[in-house]
């Protein structure tokens, strides 16, 4: 009880929440737009005539008959620009926040202030490197997962001797989904056929299920990539500020969870973990997301020396402690998709 009251007394003044909440808002504002263009990109893949031509003799050739190049191009042309804008916006906000943050006395010291004209530099080599690596990873991850799903449905068609024309039609109905989603939709289609539903009704049901699954995958990708962009922009802004002498090298980054009933058992143990700015967290990354649709963030903090006790707080006062665990890590709740499973990478 004493620790909780003391924590409440200084969280708003010294803990890193204010800044990461601003970064969260940047991500939230872009989520809908990014999800919409992701859906357009996922549907850009083209099922060509080669699927039907090669199914009987060459299943791998049939897989290659689905052209993913239009999807890759759409990811770069439609999806990457708003993600890069989120990265830049988060960096701008963090840079402008220098000098206003309650921890500024710890960040800058008593004699240093932000230089007039200092701003987030999107042309910085490390920012450019981030853009090149992340855009390539986005295209690779999405296309690889989509190709794996196509390989699964083509393999099933080959084993079951499905007529090539029917395979091509089925692929057009499920294009853009990942393997788990395609498998689930195939099982539903088989059940509707076994139930004797008319073909036209089955087609309508498949189209409806496809759009639902596509929206889910699009939002899953959007949440993951938008949070990655916003957290990465924040981290790059800190690095640039440190290089300019505007951040103390003693400050560290601190993992911040979203403390609600959706907090997952994967992220909960990471809450409050601290690392030097250029060191990876224990999960292996420089910043969240830890998993698909992860909502965690990073804050700037003074290094922890040891765990606080009630005696520490009573003897020295809450204001002496700039670090606070505000997550309620005893609240472990599932972080699942609509099927009750933790989402896959894509």
Image (spheres, helix red, strand yellow):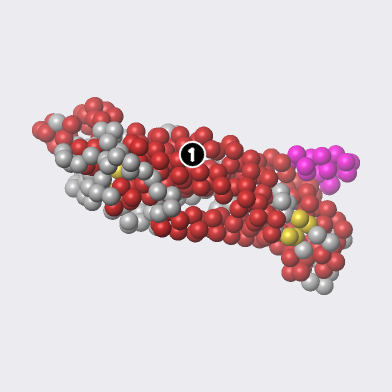
Q: Position of residue 71 (x, y in %)?
A: 68, 54
Of residues 226 and 118, the one nearer the viewer is: 118
Of residues 240 and 287, the one nearer the viewer is: 240
Image quadrant in which you'd find residue 208 = top right
Residue drawn at x 49%, y 42% is 86
SS category of the residue bearing label 1: helix
Of residues 198 and 324, the one nearer the viewer is: 324
Left or right: 86 in relation to 283: right
Give the residues in magenta.
191-209
Residue linked to disc 1: 27
> Is 164 placed above or below 293 here?
below
Helix, strand or loop for the magenta stretch, by majority:
helix
Q: Position of residue 334 (x, y in %)?
A: 49, 41
Left or right: 240 in relation to 158: left
Residue drawn at x 70%, y 56% is 70
Left or right: 108 in relation to 60: left
Residue drawn at x 45%, y 34% is 25
Count neighbours of disc 1 (C-alpha within 10 A) and say few if under 14, some if 14 to 19, many if 20 or more.
many
Residue drawn at x 85%, y 56% is 166
Residue 332 visible from this viewpoint: no
Report the quarter where the N terminus lies: top left
Which residue reaches farthest left? 315
Q: Position of residue 239 (x, y in %)?
A: 33, 51
Left or right: 101 in relation to 30: left
Q: Position of residue 87 (x, y in %)?
A: 46, 45
Of residues 131 and 307, the one nearer the viewer is: 131
Which residue reaches farthest bottom? 57
Residue 204 painted magenta: yes
> Is 157 placed above or below 260 here?
below
> Is 282 placed above or below 296 here?
below
């Amino acid at each position: 009880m004493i620790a909780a009251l003391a924590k409440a007394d200084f969280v708003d003044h010294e803990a890193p929440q204010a800044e990461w909440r601003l970064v969260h808002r940047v991500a939230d504002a872009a989520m809908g737009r990014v999800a919409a263009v992701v859906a357009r990109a996922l549907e850009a893949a083209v099922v060509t005539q080669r699927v039907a031509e090669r199914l009987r003799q060459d299943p791998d050739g049939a897989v290659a008959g689905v052209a993913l190049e239009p999807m890759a191009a759409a990811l770069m042309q439609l999806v990457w620009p708003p993600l890069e804008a989120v990265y830049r916006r988060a960096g701008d906000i963090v840079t402008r926040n220098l000098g206003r943050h309650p921890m500024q006395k710890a960040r800058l010291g008593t004699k240093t202030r932000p230089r007039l004209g200092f701003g987030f530099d999107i042309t910085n080599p490390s920012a450019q490197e981030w853009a090149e690596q992340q855009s390539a990873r986005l295209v690779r991850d999405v296309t690889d997962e989509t190709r794996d799903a196509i390989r699964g449905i083509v393999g099933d068609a080959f084993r079951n001797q499905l007529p090539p024309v029917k395979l091509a039609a089925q692929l057009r109905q499920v294009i853009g989904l990942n393997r788990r989603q395609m498998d689930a939709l195939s099982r539903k289609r088989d059940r509707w056929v076994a139930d004797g539903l008319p073909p036209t009704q089955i087609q309508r049901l498949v189209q409806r299920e496809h759009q639902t699954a596509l929206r889910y995958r699009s939002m899953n990708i959007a949440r993951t990539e938008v949070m990655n962009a916003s957290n990465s922009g924040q981290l790059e802004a800190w690095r640039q500020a440190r290089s300019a002498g505007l951040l103390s090298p003693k400050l560290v980054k601190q993992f911040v969870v979203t403390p609600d009933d959706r907090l997952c058992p994967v992220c909960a143990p990471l809450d409050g973990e601290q690392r030097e700015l250029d060191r990876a967290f224990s999960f292996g990354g420089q910043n969240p997301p830890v998993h698909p649709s992860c909502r965690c963030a990073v804050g700037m903090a003074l290094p922890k020396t040891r765990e606080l006790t009630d005696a520490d707080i009573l003897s020295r006062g809450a204001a002496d402690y700039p670090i606070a665990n505000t997550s309620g890590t005893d609240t472990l709740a599932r972080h699942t998709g609509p099927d009750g499973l933790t989402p896959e990478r894509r």
